[in-house]
Image (cartoon, helix red, strand yellow):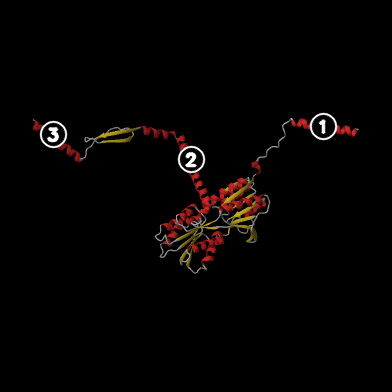
Amino acid sequence: MRKIITYFIAVIFFVTTVLTGCGQNPQTKPKLDEGNNKVKIAVSSADTKGDDYQILKMMVDKQAKEKKMEILWLDAQNNSSLQQENIQKAVKEKVKVLVIEPVETSEITKSLEALQSQGIKVICYNKLPQDFACEAYLAPDYERTGEIQAQQMLENLAGKDVGEVLIITGPQDNPVFRDLLQGNLNILKHDKRVGKVTVEELEKESSVGDTVNKYLAKTPAPQAILCHAAESTTEVINKVKESEDKDKIKTFGVATELQALDALKKKEHTGEIDMRPDLLAKLLVQTAEDLSKDEPWDYEQQITNGVQEVPVRFIPVRSITKDNISLLDERIKMLEEKQAKDGKENQKGSEGEEKQDNKDNPGDKEAGKNEDEKKTVVKIKTKDGQEFEMNIKGEIESIEMKKGEGAEEEDKKEGEDGEEGKSEEG
């Protein structure tokens, strides 16, 4: 009996709780701040001037937004000391992952190792610091890229003997330029059609234009010019356009600047190698997400970096000519829209500064206004019926009319004729 009473009381309590609970507003869990859940990633780039970087940045931002990742962009401005400051800022911002394109590969290893000791993962792209075991390395295979560029040139000159090939590259202590040159030579040295290969290794302060002009003045000039830097390519294109032999010289570049692509469409340039910044952006974001979660990332192989082993994934590049430039239509549109947007922002900035100047110096504006108000209109009518009108700034104090010598003689003659007429009448 006691068990039945206890059971009956429990049922009544349950029903009462349900009925009274339904009449109240349901409890809701507090919403979490989505911003606090975002994974923060820092990106320190060596150079931010090129169009490939602009594409990389736009694509990284787009994909990071979809994955709810926060990107902290740090511009090293090709300055190794400034990049060291970038690294310290990444630590202060408590990022999960640092994505870095090293300015100098020999001066940054210790700083990055100190970063890793604090639990921050490091992804290197385009260049690899010496003897450094980063968690991931993403880059084109530069030696293979050099081979593709040389093959592109030979295919374009198929059936022709190539007298001289000029290669304009950068300092060979830079592994990117060193590997690109090696790739060129791997192909060119085995082709009997190539008579001579000349290599110009230019330092940063060297003038590409002066170097190209020296070769264009030769007889005969080189039949092909291969460039390893985007800024060198645009300079070479401009110099060749001015040459008498412009129709005989083929130019080839690495990276796809808008100016080079425009020249490609106009048949003023022959070929480019697309380094695929769009694909690099996608892989950087995906790899950063995996590493931030301590998950394995999808690398292809491991390479030896001094005494270290580094997991790497190579970015496939592709040959671009006038025949397949349509592959880059979307990228060209993105760059053109960005340029237009930047132009409008710069214009607004200039207008804002001008308005601020007028605000800060209202006297200047009033002075200009008063000056406009002090204009005098002078109307002149000649004896033969011609009329002239002049707007003169300021107030006129006096007017002096002076006749030229011919006019004075004419008036004198008219005066004499008048006197004679009077005598005759008299």
Q: Are marks 1 and 3 in contact (CB under 8 Å)?
A: no
Label 3: state its secondary structure: helix
Task: Name the mark nearer the viewer: 1 or 3.
Answer: 1
Label 1: state its secondary structure: helix
Work out whether 355 lies above or below 130.
above
**Residue matched to label 3:** 418
Label 1 packing within 10 angstroms: few (<14), some (14-19), many (20+): few
Amino acid beneath label 2: Lys
Task: Name the mark nearer the viewer: 1 or 2.
Answer: 1
Label 2: state its secondary structure: helix
In the image, residue 58 lies at what x, y percent? 56, 48
In the image, residue 364 lies at what x, y percent? 42, 35
**Residue matched to label 1:** 13
Amino acid beneath label 3: Gly
Tag of residue 348: 2
Label 2 packing within 10 angstroms: few (<14), some (14-19), many (20+): few
Kindly identify the residue that appears in the image at 27 percent across and 36 percent down: 388
Q: Distance between the Cα atoms at labels 1 and 2?
A: 70 Å
In the image, residue 5 lies at what x, y percent? 88, 32
Work out whether 187 lies above or below 386.
below
Label 3 packing within 10 angstroms: few (<14), some (14-19), many (20+): few
Q: Is residue 3 left or right of residue 239?
A: right
Work out whether 412 lies above or below 76.
above
Kindly identify the residue that appears in the image at 54 percent across and 58 percent down: 318
Which is nearer the N-term, disc 1 or disc 3? 1
Which is nearer the N-term, disc 1 or disc 2? 1
Taking the view exactly as shown, the residue that stands out farthest to the bottom is 192
Kindly identify the residue that appears in the image at 8 percent across and 33 percent down: 424
Q: Quadrant of the C terminus?
A: top left
